[in-house]
Image (cartoon, rainbow, N blue to C red):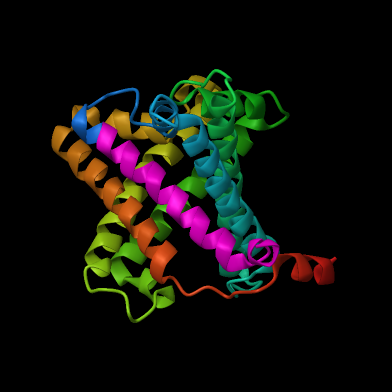
Amino acid sequence: MIDRLRRLETFARAGWFARGVVYCLLAYFAISGAGSSEASPQGVFRAIGESQGGMVLLILLAVGLAFYGAYRLYGAVLDSEGKGDDAKGIAVRVGYAASGIAHFLMAYAATRLATGGSGQGSGEQEQAAGQMMLDMPLGDTALGAVGLCFLAAAAHQAVKAWTVDFMKGVASSAPRWVVPVGRAGLAARAVVFAVIGLSLLRAGWFGSASEVKGLGDALSSLNEYPQLYILVSAGLFLFGIHSFVDARWRRIRDEDVVSRLKSAG
């Protein structure tokens, strides 16, 4: 058991599964009740916490999200996916690091609710982080730079959806429906990332953390375009399914994380 927990594959597959749960439930809440405050990661955690056995489920979800965060940070630092040290490779690895930190924050939010802490509303955590950045020297510029990173990530998601590049790491035994599901999911995520990126640019430009949008707020902001809102919400559900696909069929280098970290040190 201990040896299994040291394996990169365990971190990745548990993380993708947890991410799939969050996105599928978030999309379900969005579609079943447009504009609901539950259509956010924090809302998902609250709903799980209120269910039977919710505390245990939240802890398991938090562990999975933390595993995914660790997997992404590991990939960013040690380049486990072979992205390289050129400009493009560094940009992708920086994106991995940002993803890792974001999933650690979600894991923290889930753990806090599981242990009886009060959960923050949709966007509050992101706005608090935005205010922290604005309080720093050149914080508005830094916040704008983060916004540009989100816009770049949105473009990257869109390109992967268009070129089907995401299938390179998927085992050939995966069923055919994986391709359209992945394309729709990544396209929806690109839209949400673009909204978040633009909100960060506005926050930096106006020096106001209230402009910052998290995942739930970004989705809710599309409410004034009902058809787009439903399409993106459904796409995010398919992104959750795509995460389950990664958990089941993604090819992963099964290396000993602890041993490699020791050798790198």
In the rendered image, which quarter is residue 217 located in? top left
In the visual, does 238 lie left or right of 257?
left
x, y (%) of residue 111? 58, 32
x, y (%) of residue 81? 58, 72
> Considering only vertical position in the picture, is 149 above or below 213?
below
In the rendered image, which quarter is residue 128 located in? top right
Q: Nearer the viewer, residue 118 or 230?
A: 118
Residue lying at the far left of the rendered structure: 227
Q: Nearer the viewer, residue 170 or 124?
A: 170
- Which residue is painted at 25% across and 49% down in the image? 235
x, y (%) of residue 117? 58, 20
Q: Is residue 25 magenta?
A: yes
Is residue 120 visible in the rendered image? The answer is: yes
Q: Main secondary structure of the magenta part?
A: helix
In the visual, does 52 lie left or right of 258?
left
> Considering only vertical position in the picture, is 50 above or below 44?
above
Image: magenta residue range: 1-29
Q: Is residue 257 magenta?
A: no
Is residue 194 visible in the rendered image? The answer is: no
- Which residue is painted at 31% across and 55% down in the image? 241
- Which residue is painted at 68% across and 32% down in the image? 138
Residue lying at the far right of the rendered structure: 265
Q: Nearer the viewer, residue 4 or 130?
A: 4
